Image (cartoon, rainbow, N blue to C red):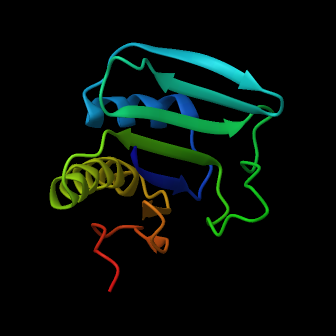
Amino acid sequence: MITSQIVVQDLADPNEVFAAARAVAGATTWRRSTFGNVHMLQTTTRQAPLTSVHYAAGGGWYPADAEDDAPTGYVLVGFGTAALAPATDRAVHERLIQGLGDWLSARNLRWSWQYEDEVWVAGHYDRPTRPQ
């Protein structure tokens, strides 16, 4: 599985962020799950790309993993696709990141993104650029 992530660093409605992420991914059916203090909204597995939103059950900061280098934020969005070819995989995820990033930026929400295990890149107001 190839993955990319976006962290929304300003307070945002996770349901609205998920609706925007689903629109970018072209996904329609989804489910809600709760894992202790984390809620997750996720598209069904028969749709590609797999799209999920994670957020704190009580609102506030999303409880990031202590070993994760992700920036702090309120909503974590994940996209997952089957591995195809490196250039194709990157292009698909850049389209997803750019689409959701444009939606977030249009609402003046700060956000950062990561493709696979690469470094996190700030994306506020500008289209994301590849890390050097």
The x, y position of residue 128, in whole percent, is 31, 68
- Compared across the picture, whether 85 is left or right of 123 comes to left
112 vs 115, nearest the viewer: 115
On screen, residue 39 above or below 117: above
Q: Quadrant of the N terminus?
A: top left
On screen, residue 11 above or below 71: above
The x, y position of residue 16, in whole percent, is 47, 32
Q: Residue at x 73, y 54 (%)?
A: 64
119 vs 126, nearest the viewer: 119
Q: Residue at x 39, y 31 (%)?
A: 50
Where is residue 47, by image quadrant? top left
Q: Quadrant of the C terminus?
A: bottom left
The x, y position of residue 78, in whole percent, is 48, 44
45 vs 126, nearest the viewer: 45
Q: Residue at x 35, y 55 (%)?
A: 101
On screen, residue 69 above or below 131: above
